[in-house]
Amino acid sequence: MTESAPELKRRALRIEQLDGHPLYLFTLTAAEVLQVADVSRVSRDEASQLIGYQRPEVRSHVQDIIDYLNSGPVVFPNAIILALSSRATFTGSRGPRANDGLATAGILTLPLAAYGEPKLAWIVDGQQRAIALSRSERSNFPVPVTAFVADTVSLQRDQFVRVNNTRPLPPSLVTELLPEVDAPLPQRLSARKAPSLVCDRLNTDERSPFYKMIKRASTRAEAAHTAVIADNSIVSMIKKSLANGCLYPFRNLTSNEIDIDGIHKALCTYWSAVRDVFPDAWGKPATESRLMHGAGIRAMGQLMDRVLVIVDPRGPDAPIEIRKHLDLIAPYCRWTSGTWDQINLAWDAVENVDGQIQTLSNYLIRVYRDVRASQS
């Protein structure tokens, strides 16, 4: 007697959108996804023809998902999208409630491939999630699956391009939403959560020098003329200083807590002094003032790490003392006109790219150091 091939049976909904290519909605466990489906890696065959359509595994992204799945009770609503072979079969349920005119309920049978044989399906969207699910500690975690029947790679690739052709969330939107997320975040996002919260306070506190000057995803069109600083520039400046600059002492490494109030006050004190020392460059669009540009914000942020090591921003005389330090570099700054000495860049030629940001930062720090040395 021949042993029957292994298979999975799942309750499913069948939706008819295109003749010959039914769509199925069902559930697999985390461990079953890669038993049923494989990843079609993009590559070239011996004749240099393009095969597959998936990018290589992104280890950091996969690990982020694994950490999230293993962190405790979680919600994982993102469906894996599969291209199913026509070897999958569907048996509709009987009864008047099995079909409501939009979908048919029934049982989907998914044959499992023997070792060395091709699997029943290809992953069209969700390969990183599928890999992470297979490696997580929660093998029985239920995963929503959307699948369409397509035996040809051309149709699979077409759907892959369409699914992934939508624009990703704007970085500014992600940054602004981070403080509202309570669930565990991937490390690269978690590192931006506290800076984003501080950024929001700087933008909404009437006593802040940045009050209503930071452009966020939620900024209304009518406020665009006053919101002249990109929030990512502020967040990047704070993040860098928290990592290894003057804001580092505001972190409690034991409890993993951050003194948001202390950081907010220190930034308000320093940047109020910047505003007072450079009034003609403050509050203008980046096209008119490189101080309000990403390069200016981040370069002055690196100078802040030098100044606030010398001046305690919590001291009663901090505003006056910080202004004295900034006065040392003021004659050498070209925020709105002229050419920066030594680095030979016109004021509006400084771009918000790492190389030029570092060049400008090094110049400001070097001038600050040399002028201080000459006066001592």
Image (cartoon, rainbow, N blue to C red):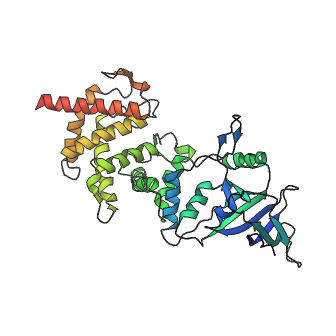
The vertical placement of 293 against 118, above or below, is above
**Total marks in image:** 0
Q: Position of residue 165 (x, y in %)?
A: 67, 45
Q: Is residue 363 above or below residue 315?
A: above
Q: Quadrant of residue 117?
A: bottom right
Observer able to see residue 296: yes
Quarter of the figure with the N terminus: bottom right
Q: Residue at x 13, y 28 (%)?
A: 374
Looking at this view, name the residue that lies furthest to the bottom: 95
| Picture coordinates of residue 251, whole percent (x, y) | 30, 58
Q: Nearer the viewer, residue 244 or 24?
A: 24
Left or right, residue 335 beside residue 84: left
Q: Residue at x 67, y 50 (%)?
A: 40
Q: Based on the displayed image, in which of its 4 quarters is residue 138 positioned?
A: bottom right
Task: Report the quarter where the C terminus lies.
Answer: top left
Q: Residue 353: percent from the left, percent from the top?
A: 44, 34
Drawn side of residue 161 relative to residue 371, left or right: right
Q: Which of the 4 quarters of the picture holds residue 375? A: top left
Q: Is residue 142 above or below residue 280?
A: below
Residue 267 relative to residue 72: left or right: left
Whether residue 275 is visible, yes or no, is no
Camera-side residue: 103 or 4? 4
- Looking at the picture, how far across and down is residue 173, in whole percent? 54, 50
Q: Residue at x 34, y 30 (%)?
A: 360
